[in-house]
Image (tube, rainbow, N blue to C red):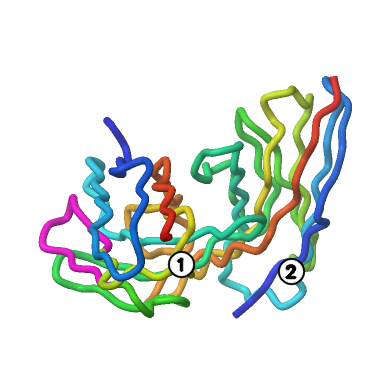
Amino acid sequence: NAGVTQTPKFQVLKTGQSMTLQCAQDMNHEYMSWYRQDPGMGLRLIHYSVGAGITDQGEVPNGYNVSRSTTEDFPLRLLSAAPSQTSVYFCASSYSISGVDTQYFGPGTRLTVL
Amino acid sequence: DAKTTQPNSMESNEEEPVHLPCNHSTISGTDYIHWYRQLPSQGPEYVIHGLTSNVNNRMASLAIAEDRKSSTLILHRATLRDAAVYYCILGYSGAGSYQLTFGKGTKLSVIP
């Protein structure tokens, strides 16, 4: 199992550009989510999905879109990048939405918006 | 949302036990207590979780107070590889969204 994979590892954007951060998992997990982590801070939830075709907003959804067409993939789209979106982005997955389940995190994407 | 409180930082000598405390006074009866850690430049990784009873695994032990308002993660022999930020998190067991609310965690430094 590769677990949770994210691409790219690093990305530099100019203000106003758009891009998609890729996330994939090969564990057949129903639940997937995106977090951002700013320097010295904990993780904040952006969007999550409880299954293919079902997504919902987390704590900080503005400026981001998601879709879940397959169980394996959960891409995060930045519509018009802003310097405030400079952060490290982590994708995570778990078997279900039960509070007992372990979440598995990807290695992260470091995004800089100039 | 139930929240947790942890010290910002702690230090430990290598090969000594480490006790990382966490307060969660507003925990509900069905919330699981999870611990994750984040090594430098990596994503968080699962350490241990529990509901009411103390738990042990190959990485650590989790001691949960009888009233569940606090817990302690125990690393039995700290190594340099254990230097990380440790997060104490409550996992909601009800239906609906499943959100792990990460605070700033405790930064553990291990002194050789």
Q: Nearer the viewer, residue A100 or B36?
A: B36
Residue B12, percent from left and from top: 87, 33
B50 is within the stretch colored magenta: no
Foreground residue, A31 or A19?
A19
Is A23 situated left or right of A69 in this image?
A: right
Query: In the picture, residue A64 is in which quadrant?
Result: bottom left
Left or right placement of residue A85 versus residue A54 in this view: right
> As displayed, is residue B35 above or below residue A45?
above
SS for dot 2: loop
Give the residue at x 25% y 58%: A30
Amino acid type for the residue under numbered disc 1? Pro
Q: Horizontal and vertical percent for residue A8?
A: 30, 43
Q: Secondary structure at mark 1?
A: helix
Please rate how many residues cluster around mark 2, counting C-alpha atoms within 10 Å: few if below 14, some from 14 to 19, many from 20: some
The residue carrying mark 2 is B24
Q: In this figure, what is the number of numbered marks?
A: 2
Q: Residue at x 47, y 63 (%)?
A: A99
| A112 over B17 or under it: above or below | below
Tag 2: residue type? His
Find the residue positioned furthest to the left: A69
- In this view, the mark in front (1 or 2): 1
Magenta-drawn segment? A65-76
Query: What's the CA distance linking mark 1 and mark 2?
Result: 35 Å
Q: Which disc number belongs to residue A83?
A: 1
Quadrant for the N terminus of chain B in the image: bottom right
Mark 1 neighbour density, 10 Å: few (under 14) some (14–19) many (20 or more) = some
